[in-house]
Amino acid sequence: ESTLAAATDIAFRKKQDKLDDEVRWSVNIVTLLRAIVGQLSGEDSEFCWDDAPYVQSEALLHLHFSRDIVDAAVKQEDVKRALGNLDIDPQDYRYLSDILDPGNRGEISALELVHGLKKLRGEPRRSDIVTVDLMVRSIQEKVTDMMHWLAEDIENKPEPNLPETNKSAETIF
């Protein structure tokens, strides 16, 4: 049993070390961003990979990509390889633009892309499920409160005063 526990612990540490490797993260994120920026048509003229890193970072912060651009980039082999190197589940590749655009706006900022990919890395944990469950419950409570406030507002609102008409049905026809 102790051998199995030690082997499990070693495997966990290896996975965690891989997730904590900043060089691995940086190299693969740059690969992804290059591929996505390369998909932009005409808009990428403002972005230059030869600029100083601080200029690149500032420019990337203002870039937004359509979901179609992200979808096209994800089909490239080097992007698939980069996503794999980041321990993102291959089953998520196909839905990546949907996952990274939860507001359904049709576009993803570079910052949203980076934050979203960080959260997708590695295997799902029970804490991920519990976090989502708690968020959904919180949203449900807020919606319920809003429904109660709306119902109270409707109940307390006075009836509108409509002008009286003395027209009978006969005068209308």
Image: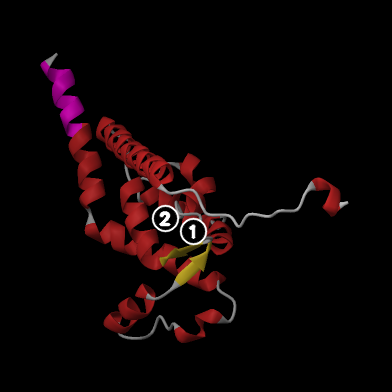
Task: Rate crowding at label 1 as few (under 14), some (14 to 19) or many (20 or more) other CA atoms within 10 Å.
Answer: some
Magenta stretch, overall SS: helix
Mark number, residue 97: none
Q: Is residue 107 left or right of residue 146?
A: right
Give the vertical position of 67 relative to 42 (above or below): above
| Outermost residue, top side | 1
What percent of the width, then of the height, locates residue 34? 45, 70
Q: Is residue 113 left or right of residue 171?
A: left
Q: Residue furthest right?
A: 173
Q: Residue at x 30, y 63 (%)?
A: 26
| Residue at image point 58% right, 61% down | 68
Q: Pointer 2 and pointer 1: residues touching (CB < 8 Å)?
A: yes
Using the numbered discs, state the Cα–Cα distance from disc 2 to disc 1 in whole angstroms. Answer: 6 Å
Inspect the image, locate mark 1, and give the three-letter code of the amino acid beneath it. Answer: Asp
Q: Position of residue 5 (x, y in %)?
A: 15, 21
Residues drawn in magenta: 2-10
Which residue in the protein does label 1 denote?
A: 78
Residue 28 in sight from this viewpoint: no
